[in-house]
Structures are given as structure tokens and as C-alpha cells.
Image (cartoon, rainbow, N blue to C red):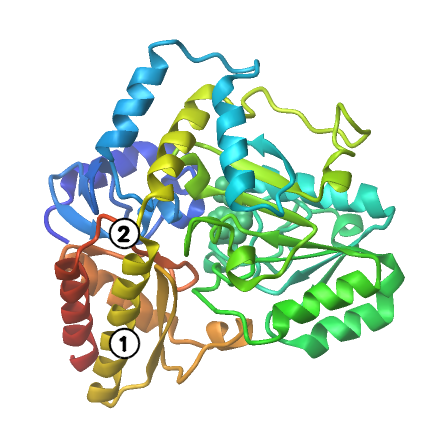
Amino acid sequence: MENTAKSESLFRRADSLFPGGVNSPVRYFDPHPLFIAGASGQRVRDVDGNTYTDYVLGYGPMILGYGDPDVLARVQEGLREGWFPGAPNAEEVSLGEMIRESSPWVEKMRFVNSGTEATMHAIRLARAYTGRKVIVKMEGGFHGAHDYSLIRSGSGSLTFGTPSTPGVPEEVSATVAVASYNDIASVEAIFDRLGSEIAAVITEPVFGNVGLIPPEPGFLEYLRKVTSEHGSLLIFDEVITGYRVEFSAYQNVIGIRPDLTTMGKIIGGGAPIGLFGGRKEVMERVTPSGPVYQSGTFSANRISMLFGLATMEKLANSDYGTLNRLVKDMAVAIREEIEGSGKVATVNQVGPMFQIFFGKESVKNYRDAMSADRGTYMRFFRHMLVKGIYVPPSQFETCFVSFAHTIEDTEKFVQGFREFIRE
Ligand SMILES: Cc1ncc(COP(=O)(O)O)c(C=O)c1O
């Protein structure tokens, strides 16, 4: 890091206002986070004037990069008409149609304001639809910060050592059974024991909140099969994966149809958004067409819809193949550096997402991720920051690459990694 005196001073003020000085725990790192003053393309600039090539992308939404001129123009133009939460608008219909056309298993949907809201409502709906209580989630799977999901969870809850948080009543935790991602036997054992009580299985199709872990062949297929056999719903939490790897939900990339899907991040282009949707007959149980209550002053607010629509229209014409190849080549180069160094480390990559784990030959599940060398990851984070490269300040997040990144950027990343691993 260069001079960060202004960030430090802002942090001192923030620390007296916000718990830990931040408004979301993943943003904190020692001795203080960087306060960002501006962002353009693939770079962010802190309040002290240092610039960084960014692989955090706002924890996922900014797949076009920052300040895309087409998005900006469209939103500015739209805002001239005003912004009026609490009433239907034409943009929500256009964005909804665009999502259903490109992700046809989302037959009906509702927009909300965050991924947290989306999964909370999807879980409640699954319970109401099936008349059952039990939810199966994966250890280390993160679905937002509500009571139903903060049970052996990932992301910031893992970074800060509170995967199951105080404040969640035991009665709620008792309705959540925890399986292991990529471990069919662990899911089978739960269904053998509780089959007829299970309302839904919720998982990210690609695990993205303990670092990045791709699905093993057959795992997601098994989840589809076992839920169908037991009359339970399958919920894919696509808050990270939706529109990440191609212009569609990840379910269409792999050809597995969940009953319900949640999305967020990319579909709002950097403005607050969430969505839950799926089979029409299930979604029609939501108020006012059905009895399952859901509401929100800011749901489908015009600002988020304008950002989402402008971003999605641009993404529909973006070349995901080239982006995915760029990141695949980068992962190959990182792997070569690891081999050349004689050190033990591994990199997982899916489309424009990747994460590096030190001290592990491979990371295929939560336990593998937990036993990676987190101390070395944090040294890597600091090393890269000094080089002007910003990766997430936690082993349990995922690095994202945007359409604004260039081959020069990824080469610089590999060079920074080379210097670190050879140290
Ligand atoms: C898979 C997944 N689900 C849900 C959420 C919660 O989304 P939000 O932070 O918008 O509430 C996240 C956040 O990172 C996530 O990664």
C-alpha cells in the first residue's frame, strides 16, 4: 500500500459510527479498509489517490466494470423522469421479460432488494408450498444474513468466525439440516432420516462463499433427483452465478432445472437488487395471488430497474466466451507458476471467477477450503495490494474478472503471483 492516511483518518471516524467501522463485515481488513473515492473500468481509486486493478467487483455485481458509459447514459436519461418507489414501472416489466427469456425456468419472479431477501422469501415459500419445515443447506454455503441461512454459513460469517451466529433462536436452527457440498452421501443420509419433512434443499450451484469450488460431476444432478423423489423443492441460489458465465442463469449452462432460483448482484448492475422466481405454480402462492406474504417499499424501484436493464441489455451482446477464456488462460498460467515454484497451492476457476488456495493440492469441498493456509492468503492479499492489485481480503470470497479487464491486467496479476510464490 502507498500512503493511505486519508483512509486511515476516515476509518477512525467510521469506527465511532459503525460496528467495526464498516457497514458490512467483509469490507474490513487490518489495519483499516481502503475508502474508495472513484471507480472506472477495471480500476478503483482510493481517497488517497492510489489506484488498484480490482478483482472484487463490488463482491460480484460489476461484471461490465465500473462506470460503463452506456449504462450511465441510459440511467441518467431514465432518471429525468423521476424515481418513484412503491409503484409499478415499465422497466420492471422489461427486465423481468429479459430474465425470463434468457432463463426460461424462472417462469414467474418477484424483484426484491438484496440476495438476503431473495433467499429468505424463497425458503419461506418452499416451506409454505410443501407444508414442511426442514431446509437442507450446505456447510459453508452462504445465502445472506437472515436466520434461516446463518447456520454453518460461509463468506464474512466464516472470515469472522461466526458461521452460526448468536441471536438465531434454537427453534429456527433446529429446522435446518446441514450437508456437505459435493458429498452425495451426506445429502443421502439426511434424506434417509428426514425425507418426508424436507421442504427444500438450497445450494449455490457453484460454491462461491468459501473461496470458489466447482460442482463435482453428478452432485447437482443428485440433488435434483433426491428432491424430486421426496417431494421437496430444489432452490439454486444464483446470486453470484446468475449471468456470470453466460447470458443466463447457471442452471441453463448445466441443464438442471431447480424449482426456485434466487438472483441478485449482476442483474442490478451495481444497484441494490434481488430476485426469487421459478415454477409458476409455486410462485403463484406469493401475495397477492397467493397467501405467502412478501412485500417491500423498494422492491423493483426504478433506480435499480434502470441500472439492471441497462446492464443486462449490454450483457446480452457481450462476448462471455472471450472473457471466460481470458480467465481460464490466467488460471493455467497461475497453475504453471505454482508448479514451477515447487510450492503447494491450487487455483479453482469457473468462467470469470477464480480463487487461489495455499497449502492445498486441490480444494473440492468446505473442509478442504477450511484447511487451506489462510495466513499465506492474507500475505498474498497484502503483496498484491502493494502491486496495485485488489483481491478480496478474505480466503472465503471469490475473485471476479470483468469485461473491462484486459490481457495486460491478467498478465500483471500472474506476474504479481509469481513474485509472491517465489519469495
Ligand atoms: C450466494 C449468495 N446468496 C446470497 C447472498 C446475499 O446477497 P446480499 O448481500 O445482496 O444480501 C450472497 C452475498 O454475497 C451470496 O453470495
Other-residue count near label 2 (Cα within 10 Å), few / some / many at <14 / 14–19 / ≥20? few
Residue positioned 16% across, 58% down in the render: 409
Q: Secondary structure at mark 2?
A: loop
> Number of numbered discs present?
2
Residue 88: give x, y in percent of width and height.
57, 16
Other-residue count near label 1 (Cα within 10 Å), few / some / many at <14 / 14–19 / ≥20? some
Q: Nearer the viewer, residue 271 or 391?
A: 271
The image shows residue 302, relative to residue 127, as above or below, that is above
Residue pointed to by mark 2? 31
Residue 198: give x, y in percent of width and height.
81, 58
Residue pointed to by mark 1? 332
Whether residue 190 sits left or right of residue 18 in the image: it is: right
Question: In which quarter of the view is residue 190 placed?
Answer: bottom right
Name the quarter where the C terminus is drawn. bottom left
Tell me if the residue at label 1 has its CB under 8 Å from ligand 1.
no
Residue 113 appears in the figure: no
Q: Whole-Å distance between the Cαs marked 2 and 1?
A: 33 Å
Whether residue 248 sits left or right of residue 418 in the image: it is: right
Q: Nearer the viewer, residue 211 or 130?
A: 130
Give the mark nearest the N terminus, 2 or 1: 2
Question: In which quarter of the view is residue 276 placed?
Answer: top right
